[in-house]
Image (cartoon, rainbow, N blue to C red):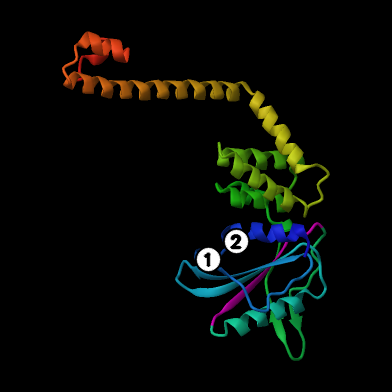
Amino acid sequence: MGQKDIISKSIFKRILVDVATYIFKLQLESVELIETEQQRVEERRADLVARVVDSEGKAFILHLGIQNQNQKTMPDRMLRYLTDIRLNYPDEDVFQYLLYIGKDALTMRDNIATAQLNYRYPVIDMHEIDYRMFMAQNTPDALVMAILCDFKDSNTKEVVHEIICRLMELTQDDKKSLREYIRMLEILASNRHFDFDIQEEFEMLEIEIEKLPSFVMGEKKGIEIGIKQEREKLKHELLEVAKHLFNMNFPIDKIIEITKLSKSDLENIN
């Protein structure tokens, strides 16, 4: 498994609930990631296995396969994973889903049908999901999923800009989180046919936004508010000193000299 796929699996661990909610239409109340003893390592594939409880209190094991390339043997591999899970958790129900996020059109089968076996699992093709479904959500984890979806007739670059701007809005002043989500976006975008660099687009947008008069005014306003808050804090501390001096029977003129407060500031200290 390549480095890109290792990171992708890490990403999907963080957004498993959003995948289950918006793509598989599962309303989950709790999620506990688990591993099977016979954990498989497959090229260009990541698997998540979790013990979950839905909104009706039903507990089951959810196996989410993530695939970014068509594989003829995928039904056999999914079946092998199912048997691994059942060997580890024989008394629990198991539900499987395969999420396809590859660049090429989906051609993989979703079943095995023979005289001895009738096996099937749902396959979700991200190419067929309208990106606006994720854009309507207010969580960054859900938002990054939009990069894998169908952009309809929208301009690709404009959609990417829209996603980045929404991420900037949702993360606000948390620069560390913003850069983590941009990195997630960049990794997921590698599963699409894009002819531009996500990181460069982000840096260019960041520069353009910082040039906007509203941003500059906001920065200036923030500095002014900070100064005002510091002044108020200092004044409060000086008033506490003045009260202490007053209780020690210092003359008002001497208290003014020490604290640099005005006479009006000291009118109500007693």
Which span of residues is magenta-colored?
92-103
The answer to whether any part of residue 219 appears in the image is: yes
Q: Amino acid at mark 2?
A: Leu
* Most foreground residue, 22 or 239: 239
Name which of mark 1 and mark 2 comes first in the sequence: 2
Q: Name the outermost residue toward the bottom.
A: 116
Q: CA distance from mark 1 to mark 2?
A: 9 Å
Q: Amino acid at mark 1?
A: Val
The answer to whether 86 is drawn above or below residue 138 in the figure is below
Q: Quadrant of residue 225?
A: top left
Q: Position of residue 152 (x, y in %)?
A: 73, 48
Q: Which residue is mark 2?
A: 16
Q: Secondary structure at mark 2?
A: helix
The answer to whether 50 is drawn above or below residue 4 in the figure is below
The answer to whether any part of residue 155 appears in the image is: no
**Mark 2 burial class by Cα count in 10 Å: few <14, some 14-19, many 20+:** some
Q: Secondary structure at mark 1?
A: strand
Q: Quadrant of the N terminus?
A: bottom right
Q: Is residue 96 magenta?
A: yes
The answer to whether 233 is drawn above or below residue 43 in the figure is above
Q: Which residue is mark 1?
A: 31
The answer to whether 211 is drawn above or below residue 99 in the figure is above
Query: Which residue is at a point 61% across and 64% down the rendered structure image?
Result: 24
Q: Quadrant of the C terminus?
A: top left
The answer to whether the residue labelled 1 contacts the one labelled 2, judged by CB atoms less than 8 Å apart, is yes
Q: Position of residue 44 (x, y in %)?
A: 78, 64
